[in-house]
Amino acid sequence: MKGKPRFEFIFIFSLISVSAIAGAASAQGIGDRNRPAESGDGRYSILGKVYLPDGKPAVDAKVSITSADAPTSTATVNLDGVFQVSGMRAGNYRVSVERAGTAPETENLTIDRFAPIGSTFNVVLHLRPARRGSEPRAGVVAANPLLADVPEDAYSKFQKGVERMAKNDPDGAIQRFNEAISAYPGFAAAYYELGSAFLKKNEPDKALEAFVKAIAAKPDFILAKYSVGYTQFIKKNYEVAAAVFDDVLKQKKDLPEVEMYLGISLYFLKQNDAAESFLKRSIANGGEKAALAHRYLGGIYMLQRRNAEAAEELQKYVDLVSQAPDAGRIRETIAELKKKP
């Protein structure tokens, strides 16, 4: 429409970019996309979540982000299991986490140099119990009941795969996890870790196959179900992802991260009423962990011309993620929204 301000279109376009959500799955860039930006100014941020083996936030875990093209950045995981580092340039990064009582964990992440300026790239890391030579197996089983009935030979191969993953060797881990599965075909935990290794190699189809087999071996394996949904999400199969996330929530209610991804999936499916409902639930259950839900909720309200509510939700997002590179642009959008009826 002629004469219509362009700020709404620009902001909504930024909302529908999945780079802020699926960055954790972009471990391998393509061609020129992972080449460092020419500018020395950091334009992006990394937002991470770190979980203990029991699924609780890994409070006080130490994070380091390294790259051949940039100085090392560090952070500490907060009470919600979240860390954020701003001022990042485009390029390839390794995110490493250490915490007492767990094995070190790493994840590769590419910041796409063609991503919109101000994009936030997300990464999720799940810590594993530390493996000590004198540690009795019972202690490991207590931390992961899925290992309770696993034969010793398969368990030993599985642990070697975990160690390879901790050393950022997904190829070596895949070999060991496959050996563990050959020794014990019903090894649900090995299938799950195999899927995680394939995701680290940016091979979502193979990861999906492994996660599905983990569920076949143990139908109530909720983390594997969530991983199926997340893998479908990063493949942009939003309808399938939404169905899986919905099934996960039927098994266990009030999972704010699942509710958030379900809401965002529904947003991309243009089911705004349902998206709004799940984004609100995510915010109610997740607090600061659901900051991104405020951003998409604001986007829905903008599309519906609910300007006051859109401004309120976007303000909440900026308040929760005040150092986000796009915070200045969002504040400008908020100011424009407040001028509208």
Image (cartoon, grey):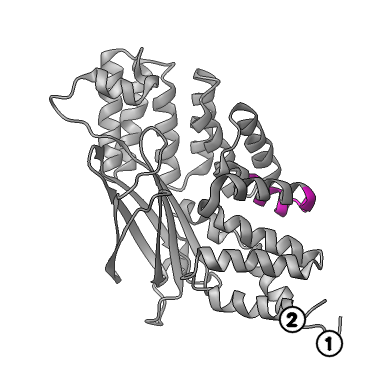
Residue 33: give x, y in percent of width and height. Answer: 47, 67
Q: Residue at x 55, y 78 (%)?
A: 328
Residue 218: give x, y in percent of width and height. Answer: 50, 19
Q: For numbered disc 2, what is the local secondary structure?
A: loop
In the rendered image, residue 235 lying in the magenta stretch gets the answer no
For disc 1, the marked residue is: 3
Residue 207: give x, y in percent of width and height. Answer: 49, 37
Q: How far apart are marks 1 and 2 (CA)?
A: 9 Å
Q: In the orientation shown, which residue stands out farthest toward the right?
A: 1
Magenta-highlighted residues: 262-273
Q: Return the residue nearer the eye: 312 or 328.
A: 312
On-image quarter of the C terminus: bottom right
Amino acid type for the residue under numbered disc 1: Gly
Q: Using the rendered view, name the quadrant where residue 19 is placed.
A: bottom right
Q: Using the rendered view, name the quadrant where residue 139 is placed.
A: top left
Residue 92: give x, y in percent of width and height. Answer: 37, 63
For disc 2, the marked residue is: 6
The reply to whether the C-beta atoms of the residues labelled 1 and 2 are less than 8 Å apart is: no
Q: In the orientation shown, which residue stands out farthest toward the bottom?
A: 3
Q: For numbered disc 1, what is the local secondary structure?
A: loop
Amino acid type for the residue under numbered disc 2: Arg
Q: Residue 225 vs residue 76: left or right? A: right
Label tally = 2
Residue 235 seen in the figure: no
Q: Return the residue nearer the eye: 126 or 91.
A: 126
Q: Residue at x 55, y 36 (%)?
A: 226
